[in-house]
Image (tube, grey):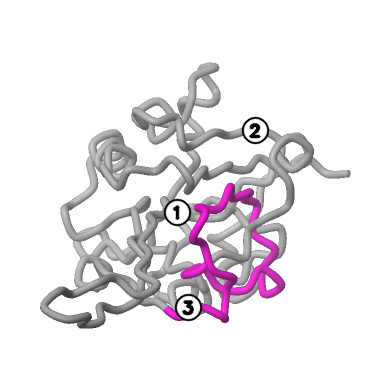
Amino acid sequence: MAKQLAFHINSSVCGNCKACQIACQDKNSLPVEIRWRRVVQYGGGSWVKQGNLMKPNGVFNYSLSVACMHCENPACVNVCPTQAMSKRADGLVLINAEQCIGCRYCEWACPYGAPHFNEAKGVMTKCTFCDDLLAQGQNPACVDACPMRAIEFGELSELRAKYGNAMDVEPLPASWMTQPAVVVTPHKHAQASGKGTGRIFNLAEEL
């Protein structure tokens, strides 16, 4: 089996502090409007009136840290006309800025919204898995920044053996599309991809 680096995201302990998101932006000197890693809040339910009180009715809420999934079948690589987007031997999906023409095909193709157009540079950018830190034997910035240790990385096969195969969790798209290199430990209220009854609460941050 080919090598495939991957992330494990433990949604059951994520506290929505966004330390991973901030660490990623700081480490990569990203402008405020570009977030390679972001924390999505998903929830739902309602409140019903009983007498003079309002009581929760199926109310739930959980957070999920999301970035490029370095997919086993990356849609971004498949649509790139210049081969600027490629999948490396260790499974990482990276962009060669010198070959990128900023056509944004990868942005439109990716179901995770991972590629971001840097208007100032005229090229696409995305999570690199902190490959420069990996080369020095260090962890990705998001991994070290999480106070709850909700993010881990390693070989996909090893992460699956340790944590299982869950990845189809709302609000993520169905995994069959690109076979994302991620393992999710779902929150106790997590709902399956495509079958959710909730919504993204911090959608304005995603726009």
The answer to whether mark 3 and mark 2 are in CB contact below 8 A is no
Q: Quick one: which residue is furthest to the front in this view?
A: 51
Q: Position of residue 125 (x, y in %)?
A: 38, 56
Q: Earlier in the sequence, mark 1 or mark 3?
A: 1
Can you say whether 94 is above or below 157 in the image? below
Residue, disc 2 = 154
Q: Position of residue 77 (x, y in %)?
A: 61, 66
The answer for how far apart the CA atoms under marks 3 and 2 are is: 29 Å
Residue, disc 3 = 105
Q: Amino acid at mark 1?
A: Ala
Q: Amino acid at mark 3?
A: Tyr
Name the image quarter holding the N terminus: top right
Horizontal side, residue 2 vs residue 66: left or right: right
Q: Residue at x 56, y 69 (%)?
A: 76
Q: Quick one: which residue is furthest to the left in this view?
A: 52
Return the residue nearer the eye: 75 or 173. 173
Q: Earlier in the sequence, mark 3 or mark 2?
A: 3
Crowding at label 2, few (<14), some or many (≥20) Cα neighbours within 10 Å?
A: some
